[in-house]
């Protein structure tokens, strides 16, 4: 069966999703949403770097998209910094009967533990439209659910689970969002950035912590944030930005599931700008710019290192591609699922859609 698909947003992840939709024979692109006036009216192929025109033009008009008789929307619009506005769009799509797969609203990676302010209106929209919503990505998402659950399936017992993204973001051209959100380049003594505010890390990654706690049968006392920065003593130049001496060039943060005062489930990021930053913090394996890693202390002890990006594609760009693929590949499974907000455990294990070479 061919699914008629709308791509909602054409940012870093959206461009990759758009390309996948156009190139896959089991998906038919019928609409594209672009917020930027500079993108509106342009052919979808042009927006994602393909040569052959699709005759599908980008629009900023939501009503035009709702009239297209589509089946599913790939929603990659930035929501974390503009949740109220994005929530209105997402509810309208779901109420119209469209299934949605999304990389935005990372709070819903584990919908059973998400806050009512987002779950309630989306649940109502799904009921009204008899539609389904699935949110995932590579991190939050894959590393803290599919990869971690696979590792746990090999454990006879597990006393502690650590999930890590350890990545050098130096060649990631996203200073306006990732750079600003993480505080890269800011003076180490400046006011806390968004990610450093109390509860922000837990809101995004705490769902993964609770998912794994449920999987191993641990009742947590609390889930709390941890946040650290590393300031460079010398200037660092990279694709993302120039960091002057005294500026933040690495961050390390985590959502920690605590039992009896001890972190027993940790979902952690270590992100730096160039290998020179934060030399005492964990690195990926030699020869790699990044890793998604799961460590299990138990019987037996387990370590799984997962890499994206082989050959000429950089690992940071590969992470963007993989984030898009994570939801595009879920379209078949989400279309077949009952209405409602879905988590990864509601879909078939190892879902992959119809990936074509």
Image (tube, rainbow, N blue to C red):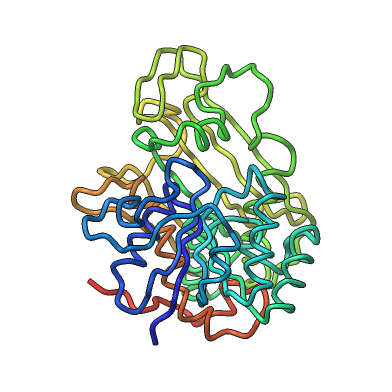
Please tell me whether residue 204 is drawn above or below residue 134 in the rendered image.
above
- Indicate left or right for 219 with 74 as reference: right
Q: Which of the pair 108/232 is nearer the observer?
A: 108
From the image, which quarter does the N terminus lie in? bottom left
Q: Which residue sits at x=47%, y=66%?
A: 6
Residue in the picture at 22% in, 60% down? 52
Position of residue 232 relative to residue 280, above or below, is above
Given the current orientation, which residue lies at the most extreme left position?
311
Left/right of residue 259 with respect to residue 269 in the rendered view: right
Q: Quadrant of the C terminus?
A: bottom left
Question: Does residue 297 show up?
Answer: no
Q: Position of residue 350 (x, y in %)?
A: 43, 77
Q: Is residue 259 placed above or below 336 in the rendered structure? A: above
Residue 294: image x %, image y %?
Answer: 47, 58
Q: Residue 185, image x and y in percent?
A: 50, 22
In the displayed structure, 136 sits above or below 35; it is below
Question: Is there any visible trace of residue 51 in the rendered image?
Answer: yes
Tally the marks: 0
Task: Name the residue located 51 percent from the left edge and 77 percent from the top edge.
Answer: 71
Could you tell whether 26 is left or right of 35 in the image? left
Kindly indicate the quadrant of the structure image that contains residue 279. top left
Q: Position of residue 240 (x, y in %)?
A: 40, 30
């Amino acid at each position: 069966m061919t699914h008629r698909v709308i791509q909602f947003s054409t940012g870093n992840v959206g461009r990759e999703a758009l390309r996948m939709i156009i190139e896959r024979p089991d998906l038919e692109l019928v609409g594209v949403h672009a917020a930027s006036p500079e993108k509106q009216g342009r052919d979808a192929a042009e927006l994602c770097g393909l040569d052959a025109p699709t005759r599908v033009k980008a629009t900023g008009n939501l009503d035009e998209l709702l009239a297209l008789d589509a089946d599913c929307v790939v929603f990659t619009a930035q929501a974390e910094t503009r949740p109220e506005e994005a929530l209105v769009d997402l509810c309208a799509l779901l109420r119209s009967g469209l299934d949605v797969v999304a990389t935005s609203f990372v709070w819903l990676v584990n919908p059973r533990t998400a806050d009512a302010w987002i779950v309630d209106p989306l649940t109502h929209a799904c009921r009204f439209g008899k539609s389904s919503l699935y949110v995932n990505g590579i991190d939050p998402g894959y590393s803290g659910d599919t990869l971690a659950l696979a590792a746990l399936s090999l454990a006879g017992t597990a006393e502690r689970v650590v999930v890590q993204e350890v990545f050098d973001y130096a060649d990631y051209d996203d200073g306006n969002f990732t750079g600003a959100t993480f505080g890269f380049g800011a003076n180490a003594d400046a006011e806390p950035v968004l990610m450093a505010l109390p509860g922000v890390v837990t809101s995004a990654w705490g769902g993964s912590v609770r998912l794994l706690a449920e999987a191993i049968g641990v009742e947590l006392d609390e889930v709390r944030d941890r946040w650290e920065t590393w300031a460079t003593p010398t200037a660092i130049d990279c694709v993302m930005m120039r960091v002057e001496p005294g500026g933040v060039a690495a961050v390390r943060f985590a959502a920690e599931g605590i039992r009896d005062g001890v972190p027993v489930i940790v979902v952690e990021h270590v992100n730096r700008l160039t290998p020179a930053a934060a030399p005492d913090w964990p690195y990926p394996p030699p020869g790699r710019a990044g890793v998604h890693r799961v460590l299990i202390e138990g019987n037996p002890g387990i370590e799984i290192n997962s890499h994206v990006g082989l050959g000429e594609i950089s690992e940071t760009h590969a992470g963007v591609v993989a984030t898009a693929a994570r939801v595009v590949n879920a379209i078949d499974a989400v279309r077949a699922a009952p209405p409602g907000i879905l988590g990864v455990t509601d879909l078939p294990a190892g879902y992959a859609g119809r990936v074509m070479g």
